[in-house]
Amino acid sequence: MDSSCPCPLCGYGRGSSFHRDRRREYLRCPVCALVYVPPVWHLDAAAEKAVYDLHENSPDDPGYRRFLSRLAAPLLTQLGGRSALGLDFGCGPGPALVQMLREAGHTVSVYDPYYFPDTAVLSVDYDFITATEVVEHLAAPGLQLDRLWSLLRPGGVLGVMTKLVVDQQAFARWHYISDATHICFFSQQTWRWWSLKVGAELEQVAADAVLFRKPHL
């Protein structure tokens, strides 16, 4: 395994070893601070989907809706009272957040490579885009995030939920890395780097949720 494989977010940094457990190694980029798993340890598509098929995230589960509200509530505040057009990227088989946003009066499309694979929705401009518990699964997060950002209208908002890396010691004990489909791990430093790269206004609205606002022209 070539531990110098380039960072999948910025494409510049050559990661150095950050942690290793009995299953795989985790590298940390010196440029954007992303912690990532080299491709040699990524699951194939069938194995990845088999894990996702085990998830039970019902739109009618009050606990799951409370979890999603950490992103949904501040996003709805940002959108104000107007009806907006949005996309939930990587929504999974039970798009609970979509239901919550539709209940608030917004029009929301869905995309998921396994469950809602219609790529036509990735050629539309949106007022907001959400990605909850998605970016940690992306093999090419730089390309995917840049693509989503390009779909946002001026003044639009990208909302992301993912657990954040704190430090190396906490990472070694972190339950989040035990999921074999989790291959990218972000931190506050990483999100600051990315917001500067795209020129976004960054707001951390929860321990695991951030909003990026696109500047008006």
Image: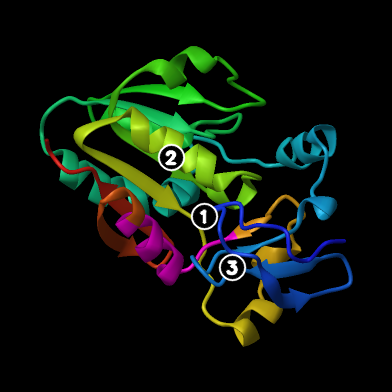
Q: Which span of residues is magenta-colored?
A: 185-196
Mark-to-mark CA distance, 1 and 2: 11 Å
Image mark for residue 10 = 1
Q: Which residue type carries mark 2?
A: Asp
The residue shown at (72%, 58%) is: 5
Amino acid carrying label 3: it is Cys
Magenta stretch holds residue 163: no
- Gap between marks 3 and 1 measured at Cα: 9 Å
Q: Residue furthest front?
A: 12
Magenta span contains residue 188: yes
Q: Which residue is mark 3?
A: 29
- Is residue 159 rendered to the left or right of residue 10? left
Residue 64, percent from left and from top: 49, 48
Q: Is residue 37 visible?
A: yes
Find residue 15 and report its image quarter. Answer: bottom right
Q: Is residue 134 visible?
A: no
Task: Report helix, strand or loop for mark 1.
Answer: loop
Residue annotated with mark 2: 146
